[in-house]
Image (cartoon, helix red, strand yellow):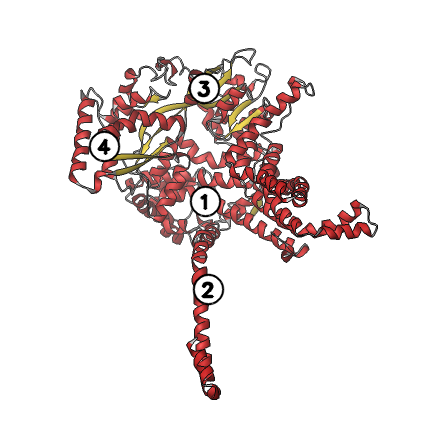
Amino acid sequence: MKTCRTALIAAVAGAALVGGAGVASAKDLVMVSWGGAYSASQQNAYHDPYMKLNPGITIINDDSSNDAVAKLRAMNEVGNVTWDLVDVVAADAIRLCDEGLAMEIDHDKMLAPAPDGTPASEDFGDLIVSECFIPQIVYSTTFGYRTDLVKTKPTSVCDVFDLAKIPGKRSLEKRPINNVEWALICDGVDPKDVYDMLETDEGVDRALAKLSTIKDQVVWWTKGAQTPQLLADGEVVIGSTYNGRLFSLIEEEKQPVAMLWDWQVFDLDGWIIPKGTKNLEEVQKYLYFATDTQRLADQAKFISYGPARKSSAPLVGKHASLGIDMAPHMPTDPNNAKTTLLYNYEFWADYRDDIDEKFQAWLIQ
Amino acid sequence: MVAIAETGKQEPLRAASGELLKVSLRRSLRRQRLQAVGLVLPLFLFILFTFLLPIGDMLFRSVENQIVGETLPRTVAALKDWDPGAQELPPEEAFAAMVADLKVAREQRTASRVGQRLNYEYSGMSSLFRSSARKVRRIEDPPFREALIEMDEDWADPAIWKVIKQFSGNFTPGYFLAALDAQRTVDGEIAMAPSDQRIYLPLFWRTLALSAFITLMTFLLGFPIAHLLATVPTRISNLLIIMVLLPFWTSLLVRTTSWIALLQKEGVINDFLVGIGVLADDSRLTMIHNAAGTVIAMTHILLPFMVLPLYSVMKTISPSYVRAAQSLGAKPAYAFWKIYFPQTVPGIGAGAILVFILAIGYYITPELVGGTSGTFISNRIAYNISSSLNWGLAAALGTILLGLVLALYLLYDKIVGIDNMKLG
């Protein structure tokens, strides 16, 4: 009922705009996202329904999320912000908020409450990691492996470091984040102490020493699409990437690949409103619609990322074209989330530059 | 024109109208000059705004450091007389100034930028400034030293203050030092990073070495093709030129990805070699995600830039020279080496410079096929621009790269002579 009313309000508002002002009759909203399957899921779940309800609005996709912080900084320096809404990972949202490049959000005022009336800030809960951030999905970085190319099935992330058990190439992301955590856990460090350890030079050296044991068997990736391709070609037998990419490889492209959820690293992705957008009013209307309980649950029909609202979880249904149940494919599903890490925003904001330099030096040795 | 006609009519008054002639001539010359300037102006403005100004901006960014002085003006002033050599904390005024600066920075949201800037020099600055700016509102009364240290005990570390003092100037060599794998220690000395922790020097060296090797490969492959193109009848050479140019019409990304499909372990070439029994299935060649992949893919992509200047120079070499040499008794190889080859040097020079300079700045191909041993300095520049957001370091790296290219260009001018270069 609530969603119906929201839709109605949006429709009326849209109609009023179309009728009211000639200037606003054709408004373009530039929305920045990641491209590929992810943008497609947003198009299906948010953009298309919204444009149907608001014939005056055209949503233009810009696949620049990868360099969103750099580009927003540049736009800000020049004083001409051409984006209206930007999809970024939480770490970038925190950076943008700190620098005053993103608008602060009053979540309860600007976003729809849950169907039972729970205010938005409670519905999103502690996923609101920054006052500028509107969480959208929970995703994870985890491993997929070729079921037909491994003799014994990997059961733990430490099997990635075990060349005897899983011989062959593996792919890892070309950055220290996630890799050094896994390396330390598999070197026997208590997961609780991982970040304390990484603050010291010895800790980083220990992680790199562990990674050195498999270094010549690693293919390093920089783009999310690389591991799925490498797995499909049989170039690697196991590799890390985002869980949604693995889902489409396994379920949509029917490749002989299976998930290894052990010690998956959760991260968040969501919207920020860039400071200086010229269409603030329109953007707010869109956001109210696109982040309500139903819309977030709808996105999960198209991609296997967990909706950020608690109230959306029970509404997650079947995949739009495959008709399979999506809940067991969510990273947050209890069966998948037995051992997890959460991306440590505070730690990496401080140590990213430093550890990355050591990591890069180690790479080219 | 009118003036000339007039002087023609009044020929006896040549001396009197001589000045008139001069003036009118000057006017018409000025008009011509203005026309010429007008024609060049659009290009000049275009180059100014899209090329010269951005390069100037880059040069400036690689040394500018105004953010510390602008965000923490009171602290910088208060630290002026503090001796960082003494192992003790700065006086109370510095703490009071820091509290005042942080309060302003909080309002203007500049605390995290300055923290990030200082974090490049000393880890932990980023969170110190971020969290302190958040909490600084609570501090109202002196003593500020105790209050600040109570808020975050890192403020009791003299190194923090040393770093702030050291990087409080409007200009800094810090980015250039970092780009050369050196660093100013907290005590002000310049120290090179230990050799196993160097990133940029090895990358610069690798970029130069691989680019030179790629240039050599394009020359070895391109020379015979260009010679063939220049000697066969026009009808066939036109067809061949289209085949040389064909890759130009295909997206760079497509060409790079097709090399992945060809070269990878389970790729076409390895499959073929295993299929005909040259290789065993478990000893497939590793031809991609390493330096070999970068060399192969880039040699292919840059080949036309070598072939075309070579071809246009060879086209102008008259075959009668070689014939004359042979008729005078030179063996074909000798005639080629003594007569033909020297005449192609301007083309080789042009092609080599084109390929080398393009290769040195290549980004997407090394990124996709280079793995860890085949990436270039440009990949690190891109990383610093878009991921770590250390634009100062990226600018310093870019400036060094620009300097290297210019130095090599001058070296080339000294050895071969730049007027000896021909594009056609």
Q: State how many labels appear.
A: 4
Answer with left or right where residue A40 lies relative to residue B362. Answer: left
Q: Could you tell me which residue is drawn at 59 percent across and 39 percent down?
A: B239
Image location of residue B281, percent across then percent down: 65, 17
Q: Give the Cα distance between marks 1 and 3.
A: 37 Å
Which is more N-terminal, label 1 or label 2? 2
Q: Give the Cα distance between marks 2 and 3.
A: 61 Å
**Secondary structure of the residue carrying numbered label 1:** helix
Q: Which mark, residue A55? A: 4
Query: Is B391 above or below relative to A218?
Result: below
- Label 2 sits on what residue type? Ala
Out of B235 and B250, give the one closest to the viewer.
B235
Residue indicated by mark 3: A249
Are both tags, 4 and 1, on one chain?
Answer: no
Are both tags, 2 and 3, on one chain?
Answer: no
Which quadrant would residue B10 be assigned to in this image? Answer: bottom left
Q: Can residue A54 be seen in this view?
A: yes
Q: Give the Cα distance between marks 2 and 1.
A: 39 Å
Bin the neighbour count of mark 1 within 10 Å (Cα to Cα): few under 14, some 14-19, many 20 and up.
Answer: many
**Secondary structure of the residue carrying numbered label 3:** helix
Which is more N-terminal, label 3 or label 4? 4
Asked whether the beta carbons under mark 1 and mark 3 sit within 8 Å of each other, the answer is no
Image location of residue B253, percent across then percent down: 50, 34
Q: Give the Cα distance between marks 4 and 2.
A: 52 Å
Q: Is residue A365 visible?
A: no
Q: Which mark, residue B391? A: 1
